Amino acid sequence: MAYEEYVGRTESRWDTVWPLLIRGVAATLDVAEEEAAPGGVLPPTWHWMLFQDWAPAHELGADGHPRRGGFLPPVHDLPRRMWGGSRISFLRDLKAGERIRRDSTILKVEEKQGGSGRLVFVTVRHEIASEDHPAVGPALIEEHDIVYRGGDGAAVKPAAAAPPPPAGAFRRTVLPDPVMLFRYSALTGNGHRIHYDLDYVTREEGYPGLVVHGPLQATLLADLLRRQTGARMARITFRGRRPAFHQNELTLVGWEAGGRVRLETRDHAGAVCMSAEAELA
């Protein structure tokens, strides 16, 4: 199928930085709100709880997502849909109660062949700006990669443990249990059943457990960096490497490298699930 007609497509949406959602994410991460979001400033990556897509029940697909089509291309023949990564620049603080607007543009749609067969990559650029202070320009710019792949073959393949991080690395271990995954799904309006429906994810998609959201892993890494440095983040790039599952501990690790900070999530076997690189302001 040709997807060229979707490139350049745009949409705009409006929302408010709701204080209740900030409290909810802080509670889900088990961190005090005043520590994570002092003065009501929205922490890095917490914007993913905004601009939620609540489709009517009759418009949902079997996987819990809205049926395909609309703004994004309808990749009907590839059932597995994943968050592949993001590149985010934080230009200005967003604060609790602020009215905001998100302008989204589809930058590209690419078809590739991978080890698991045909893949479709969709890259969307989001610009989030204040409606209360429109003259100051965007507060955040993100390029977001969405990956579609087929259901044939193994849902997840074995991977070797990564080399140990360098001396001086900082780390934290978390258990992304079903309660954390359910709460994050609710906070972000994400109905994808792979994150909370164990029967569905094992029987229909072939995964060994509930899948830990890519954005949740990225948010945990950003929180790890906040705990370590307390510095303002200027930019961060994330890339999903392999799925992480609810029954396994997840190790968050970071270290300085060439003036930037490298960050990773690693599963119980030491394999990298998500890699990231951050620049501090």
Image (tube, rainbow, N blue to C red):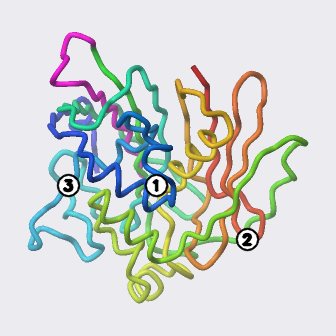
* Mark toward the start of the polypeptide (1 vs 2): 1
- Under circle 1, the secondary element is strand
Q: Amino acid at mark 2?
A: His
Residue 20 magenta: no
* Mark toward the start of the polypeptide (1 vs 3): 3
Q: Main secondary structure of the magenta part?
A: strand
Question: Which residue is found at the position 16% from the left and 35% from the top?
Answer: 11
Q: Amino acid at mark 1?
A: Leu
Q: Tag 2: Cα neighbours inside 10 Å, few (<14), some, or many (≥20)?
A: some
Question: Looking at the image, which is closer to me, 109 or 63?
Answer: 63
Residue 226: % across, % down: 59, 39
Question: What residue would you read off at disc 1?
Answer: 119
Q: Is residue 129 left or right of residue 224?
A: left
Q: Any mark on residue 53, and which? A: 3
Q: Is residue 104 above or below residue 216?
A: above
Question: Which residue is found at the position 80% from the left and 64% from the top?
Answer: 160
- Under circle 3, the secondary element is loop
Please state the extent of the stretch shown in magenta in the rendering: 120-136
Question: What residue would you read off at disc 2?
Answer: 268
* Mark toward the start of the polypeptide (2 vs 3): 3
Question: Which residue is found at the position 50% from the left and 70% from the top?
Answer: 211
Question: Looking at the image, which is closer to me, 77 or 138?
Answer: 138
Give the distance between the C-alpha atoms of the residues marked 1 and 2, in whole angstroms. Answer: 28 Å
Give the distance between the C-alpha atoms of the residues marked 1 and 3, in whole angstroms. Answer: 24 Å
Q: Residue 92's quadrant in the figure? A: top left
Residue 124 magenta: yes
Q: Is residue 221 above or below residue 114?
A: above
